[in-house]
Amino acid sequence: MSMLTPGRAAVNVVGAASLAALTLSWMGLGRAAALAQVPNSLSSPGAVRLREIPLQQITIDDKFWSPRLEVNRTKTLDHVYQELEATGCIRNFDIAAKKATGTFGGPWWADSDVYKWIEGASYVLATHPDPALDRKVDDLIAKIAAAQEPDGYLNTHVQIEEPDLRFKDLAFFHEDFSSGHLFEAAVAHYEATGKRTLLDVAIKLANCFDATFGPGKRDGLSGHEGIELAWVRLYRATGDERYLKLAEFYLNERGKKPSVFQREYERLPPDRTVLWRAGQPINLRALQDHFFLKPLADHSFLTHPTTFDTSYSQDNLPVREQSVAVGHAVRAMFLYSGMADVAYETGDQGLLDALHRLHDNVTLRRMYVTGGIGPSSKNEGFTDDYDLPNDNAYQETCASAGMVLWNYRLFKLTGDGQYMDLVERSLYNAVLAGVSLQGNTFCYATPLACDVKFARQPWFEVPCCPTTAARFFPSIGRYAYNQSADGVWVNLFIGGSANVTLADGSRMVLHQTTGYPWNGGTRLQIDVDRPEEATLHLRVPGWASTWSITVNGKPARRGTADGPEVSRGYAHFHRHWAKGDVVEITFPMDVVKMEANPKVLQSRGQIALRRGPLVYCLEQPDNQADLGRIALSRNAKLDARFEPALLGGVTVITGEGRLQDPDSWQNQLYRPVRAGTGEPVSIKAIPYCVWGNRGQKEMKVWIDAAQ
Amino acid sequence: MSMLTPGRAAVNVVGAASLAALTLSWMGLGRAAALAQVPNSLSSPGAVRLREIPLQQITIDDKFWSPRLEVNRTKTLDHVYQELEATGCIRNFDIAAKKATGTFGGPWWADSDVYKWIEGASYVLATHPDPALDRKVDDLIAKIAAAQEPDGYLNTHVQIEEPDLRFKDLAFFHEDFSSGHLFEAAVAHYEATGKRTLLDVAIKLANCFDATFGPGKRDGLSGHEGIELAWVRLYRATGDERYLKLAEFYLNERGKKPSVFQREYERLPPDRTVLWRAGQPINLRALQDHFFLKPLADHSFLTHPTTFDTSYSQDNLPVREQSVAVGHAVRAMFLYSGMADVAYETGDQGLLDALHRLHDNVTLRRMYVTGGIGPSSKNEGFTDDYDLPNDNAYQETCASAGMVLWNYRLFKLTGDGQYMDLVERSLYNAVLAGVSLQGNTFCYATPLACDVKFARQPWFEVPCCPTTAARFFPSIGRYAYNQSADGVWVNLFIGGSANVTLADGSRMVLHQTTGYPWNGGTRLQIDVDRPEEATLHLRVPGWASTWSITVNGKPARRGTADGPEVSRGYAHFHRHWAKGDVVEITFPMDVVKMEANPKVLQSRGQIALRRGPLVYCLEQPDNQADLGRIALSRNAKLDARFEPALLGGVTVITGEGRLQDPDSWQNQLYRPVRAGTGEPVSIKAIPYCVWGNRGQKEMKVWIDAAQ
């Protein structure tokens, strides 16, 4: 029975923040600005620590996401497994177990890609019972277990190729990175299936690390971060505090002078021929055995030992002193995520302060409009403030997924919608563009403008991005909902349900139906065993200029007793909920022309189109005019319409552009300003996330502004 | 007696090229585009080889230039001499001559700066008899002669500090660079005074080189080019063909694999501690003795020997295969000038072709709107096509002067006005900005936008730019006039006169009066002993949208028999000239808003102002609004007016700009496009060449275009 009287139910709001305050904060930046007034948003009075809801309790039934997830489950997972097999990555475990002979296959961190596949398969098993997949995972886990050394050590590259270098080339061999992915896969598998098979392997390996590294033992530092957050995940799954201590230890080792890597390097056997890669030693034999040899000379991040570039792996400063996102972008995202996880568990203020500074640096100076990061192929990472080239945007898919991992952790630390806005932005744009609609080709680099030479590939010599796609997408339900002491948080507008056990042990199920991201209407139907007093925290995206909310069909007006308080990007409904209560929220899905801070030279004088959470792009098949000729007036009228037959059904943006003279700058460096804006031309833009699914065609996100 | 009848005198023209053809070619680029159609403008059918007119035969009496030259003569020359004395650069010769004791002073190429001072003083002596200066020069030459070794060798740094490294560290020690400046100074001194004192020293040194380097002798290559053009100059002064052969030899040695430098480096004594600087060996002891030690670590052009960067000194390719301007910009300008001088003497088509390609590369992709070059402090030189940062523009004064040297030589090879347009542009903007109105402070780097931290300095640890100012400005008469077989060329609009001996031995004097660059009217009065048939080639600047010409007060119409043919940037008057004939040419001095090719990201969406040959800038003292807030509409009306009391008298540009919100981008990386153009604000621009004479103030050349 509802405890609400009609007068109290029809609470609150046609909420409308001012345009200045909210449309400007689409990118989470208006809020960041406001938050910059307080010392640290991550520990501000309003911060609320959120908990995750087990993946099994979340379903997805959504016009936008379900087809993508189904492709991931039925195509990507198989495709990735076959490639792992074909490249020898799986056979490595048999060789290490002495059940097969041969040479090591794949990159020297190939184990991590196998573990990432298991992690993805486990997320699928959590919500899609599949005996065949379950057996396949079990078989693979048996191979892994068989390869493990009696003392728990497990890294097939070192075991097969470099047994005397076990734990000796910390900067380069990725033993810790691969182990971190094993920990993650093991916990995911255990949580999905209840089986301890892989978890036991992980614990045995974790204890092998614990016996080797830590205060009073050996220095330990990860050449490619990732183990830090995995230590916390293993700690949460097992309750073993040694793992949390190791997470802190690995963070605290970073930024020492001289670097742990350099000290470790000096201890390497002198007969080893070692090059340096971005300040990290590279074993030349490993290089020759693998694939890096030819491109090596092209990699300008190869530096001389005397100029040891510690920033490549964020080893330039102690983590609590870091303020600027430097070096390899994926490494950075894993590090910052690990810092956030440790801070979540320990409340470490130094880590929170550093995360706040780093987040400002990334989101105010070093992030693409798509939410992707890391512009340079040279270091696969960050360069300078406001350096965001479009044509050669590296924007690695793994780094984009890393933005989701990191911002989600900051959201869990705070309940602040600015971070969820960024989760959404990276997810719907940069990450999703990383995989084709068919699910079997992938972006490693993801440019924001490209010519016909660019295309997604089925696999890469460094195959981290396909395996990231395999493990990432089946977990997106994780980001859609959270819990707090007082109730439930609805973060993402994805059709489906969340089955939540409230603090008092009672059950609350939220059924979500939505047309998002194509239209801005979302309906939540609440199912409770009995009337429940709880708070429903419903996200109001920072990009939404206005919104309207109804409760049980009646406008929920702001300012009345039961009206939602709207703060920090969420509408907070504290109510007694009854079975069948319905909350509806609607945002206008206007087409918005975006501009970049003029300090971003590469996008100066250009316009990007956004509608809802989606960034759009021009792709050649939709436009008769050469993309290089198209300009768009800042006050051009633009329309949106859904095209069910296009790219699985997408809303396109159409309007009138202006045709520039492509040859007008031929053989000229400077000229008098010209009058006139060019002939009109029809333009049509598609969501960036479905770009590149019709062969190799020109594409661009940023469109020249017509004068 | 004039042989012209009235009907024939009143020839030709109110010439008006189309706006498209001519205003667009202001930067010489419209023409370059046209010339790109023919294989090689440097050997096209219309090319005319021009000769220089001795400096003694040219006077300057000009409202714009005379005050600057007087400051150079009375202030700069003394200032530079005092600094050379204070830093030990002059005493070095006494130490080398064993007439004094002590350590070497100044940078290791300090001799070159002393020679450059002598060169400048000689140009002054050529037109301003000055017994005191003459004695000062003689005394200095005596010191230099005394320091010379019996075999002719002369380099005080090597003699004092590294006697066993004579001619052994070619890449680094600048023995050739300094010697080149000695050759130039010696010829200048000889031509100005008729004295052979320094010329004899130069010849003795030249013969020492000739005994050491050349085909069948040792490899020789200049680590800092400059000797190549000096060899040609010495050849022209002496007629000794060995020097021309050495010029060719030095060109031909460049771009060998392995580099001559690398081979020479490997022959260095093994006990030497040598670092590498941009692929060139650096003697560490020399470094420690001098000043480079601290900044060294900051110089990213320090590279590892295994990645020997030969492009720094244009040693990456044989000169005839070069197409892209790379490396250190001053070195490049000296090299290209030397190539042009050799080609002038030999007609070497391979050199001409390479010069044509390099010129296209520089002027279409790598040049500032001011005619300066070399954007980066890292290598003091070129970076990538269209990379032209304004804030940190390096645009070294010596490189800007090098653009004049190079383009003047290309002009002499062709008679093509496109090159003289560039001489003018670099001279009136980039070079002239390199020295203060007081003549005693200088730019080394010359930014196109700066904050209050930047100021001209009286001297530098590397003092090449002050000595370049000292030697360059007294020679500008050289660029104003030339001769060809058929007559006289008037290139620059500078009041004064040229006294020319024509092919038949008769004399023609041109008296020029002009308001240039403040207004566009120039009057040439011809003085001949007897009526003379000759061609007067009068420059029509590429930036002029229209022009009008009168002969003896009557419009000289195009198409009539005596009318000037206008081609390749010149009006060619073939006539019988009588004493008192007057030719007048007038250009409209409109204010023109310029834009950069959009590939120049750093100036995209911005406007630069030009009036006549002068590029303008906003400087804070003239503008109430912060420069960062000022935007300018592409169709704003702008006015020009002469302000006699400002900065020695300059024409300023005024108009209405728009006030941008300075904080509108605070804490935002992306935002919706804003409507509106801001409040109106008065703006006032001054010529870039007089910027920075009122203390350290903000300045910017490129102004945001209002939307």
Image (cartoon, coloured by chain):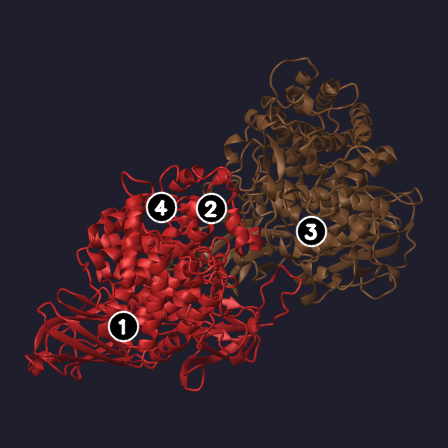
Chain colours: A red, B brown
Name the residue tied to disc 1. Answer: A126
Measured as percent of width and height from the top left, residue A347 is found at: 20, 51
Which chain's residue wears label 3? B
Between disc 3 and disc 1, the foreground one is 1
- Which sits earlier in the primary sequence, circle 3 or circle 2? 3
Task: Pick whichever, A544 or B508, lies toward us.
Answer: A544
Q: CA distance from mark 3 to mark 1?
A: 72 Å
Name the residue tied to disc 4. Answer: A221
Measured as percent of width and height from the top left, residue A286 is found at: 50, 50
**Residue at the front extreme of this rendering:** A99
Between disc 4 and disc 3, the foreground one is 4
Q: Residue at x 81, y 42 (%)?
A: B52
Q: Secondary structure at mark 4?
A: loop
Circles 3 and 2, Cβ within 8 Å, touching? The answer is no
Q: Quick one: label 3, few (<14), some, or many (20+) residues within 10 Å?
A: many
Q: Amino acid at mark 3?
A: Leu
Name the residue tied to disc 3. Answer: B422
Q: Amino acid at mark 2?
A: Glu
**Residue at the bottom extreme of this rendering:** A645
Name the residue tied to disc 2. Answer: B698
Task: Pick whichever, A425 or A228, lies toward us.
Answer: A228
Tell me the quarter of the image containing the N terminus of chain A.
bottom left
Q: Quick one: label 2, few (<14), some, or many (20+) residues within 10 Å?
A: many
- Which sits earlier in the primary sequence, circle 4 or circle 1? 1
- Return the mark for residue B198: none
Which chain's residue wears label 2? B
Q: Is residue B153 left or right of residue A241?
A: right
Between disc 1 and disc 2, the foreground one is 1
Which chain's residue wears label 4? A
Where is A636 relative to A667, above or below? Answer: below
- Callouts 1 and 2 on one subunit: no
